[in-house]
Amino acid sequence: MNGRIARGAALTVVGALLVSACTSGASPGATSPVPASGSIQPASDSPTTEPTPSEEMSFAVAFTGLGFSDAPMFAAIDALRSQGYTIDTPEVADPNLMIAGTAEGQFQFSSGDTAALLRAINQGAKLKIIGERVGDEWTLGTVADISRCEEMEGRTVAYHAVGSFNEVIVRAYIRENCPGTMPQEVIIEGSENRAAAMLADRLDSSPLELSDAVNILDKGGDKFRILTSFNETLPNLRPATLAGNVDFMEQNPNTTRALLKAMLDVNRRINEEEGYLKEIALEYVPSLDEAILDEVVEQYVEFNLFDSNGGVTESNINYTVQFFAQAGSIPLGLGVDQAADLSYLNEVLDEIGRR
């Protein structure tokens, strides 16, 4: 079976959770969105991505694992290393521990789970969203005999970790589409490992990254289906953001901007240079199945999952905050200015132009 997941293939929409977010644009008690200039002032009248002598050129960007969609970030990090930066890339499987380590200064940036990030910020962690690693690449894959939400009753579904984004989104999907349905929930870290469990007939359903959804459709033929694609049903949701430690960023604004600029440079090459995404995927994720790689690359580019302007705006951050509040992951009332500081990204875009 061809592994293509066409636009418009999603079967249902997680919609009711977001009525208030889509109509009012803010939750009760939310503070006003941060202005374009942000709350953190640049180091000078002319912000730059060149570090000053007093700025730190050594830092860590933490990941929850290494998959196809991490390749662009690793390419950006290597570009900075060639400029003299020293950058560690630790893997911390539990997103809650990764976020805690970033808040405590063990890591300076973290790449991944927005749900865990917003919970930490709500509890007082000095962290801010500054960009996006990848757009919403998540799907809900199931065995073929689960064709409706209700048919997940009593069947196994696996998540990466307790409280992770994919746990939140699947539970929200069930509450909206088949309230009261009770699947058997298990934990299997890594989308690729959950896909492998499905292919081995040990798992009935799972949230899967787009690359792994293509994989099970290609290898499993008619054994599997994609019940919904969240990129289609929730296009404004930003589940995989880049966060930074506030103290580090305030002390190193040019280094922070340099990281964002390197990310945008890579994203723009992906969108403008045919073959570049495949090239870096093969370089940084050697475990990829080359038999389906062309199809995976095509779909990530088609869905614009590596945005040329950074992927995050006040509007979609507000939407994301409200989604997680309505889903019960965080309390109502967290404002965009508490969750994000887009000043660094906007300054980089002012320097290199928007596309």
Image (cartoon, rainbow, N blue to C red):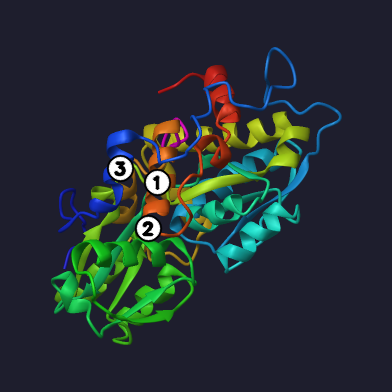
The three-letter amino acid code for the residue at tag 2 is Ala
Identify the image quadrant of the N terminus: bottom left
Helix, strand or loop for the magenta stretch, by majority: loop
Disc 2 on helix, strand or loop? Answer: loop
Assess disc 2: are there few (<14), some (14-19) or many (≥20) residues with their C-alpha within 10 Å of its C-alpha.
Answer: some
The three-letter amino acid code for the residue at tag 1 is Gln
**Percent of width and height locating residue 187:** 45, 79
**Percent of width and height locating residue 69:** 45, 53
Q: Going by the picture, which residue comes out furthest to the top?
A: 45
Identify the image quadrant of the C terminus: top left
Is residue 310 highlighted in magenta?
yes
Residue under label 3: 20
Is residue 99 highlighted in magenta?
no
User: Which tag, 1 or 3, sits closer to the chain's start?
Assistant: 3
Can residue 334 be seen?
yes
Judge left or right: residue 76 versus residue 48: left
Residue under label 2: 327
Between residue 228 and residue 178, name the one nearer to us. 178
The three-letter amino acid code for the residue at tag 3 is Ser
Q: Which residue is drawn at 49% across and 18% down?
A: 353
The label number, if any, that marks residue 49 in the structure image = none
User: Which tag, 3 or 2, sits closer to the chain's start?
Assistant: 3
User: Which tag, 2 or 1, sits closer to the chain's start?
Assistant: 1
Disc 1 on helix, strand or loop? Answer: helix
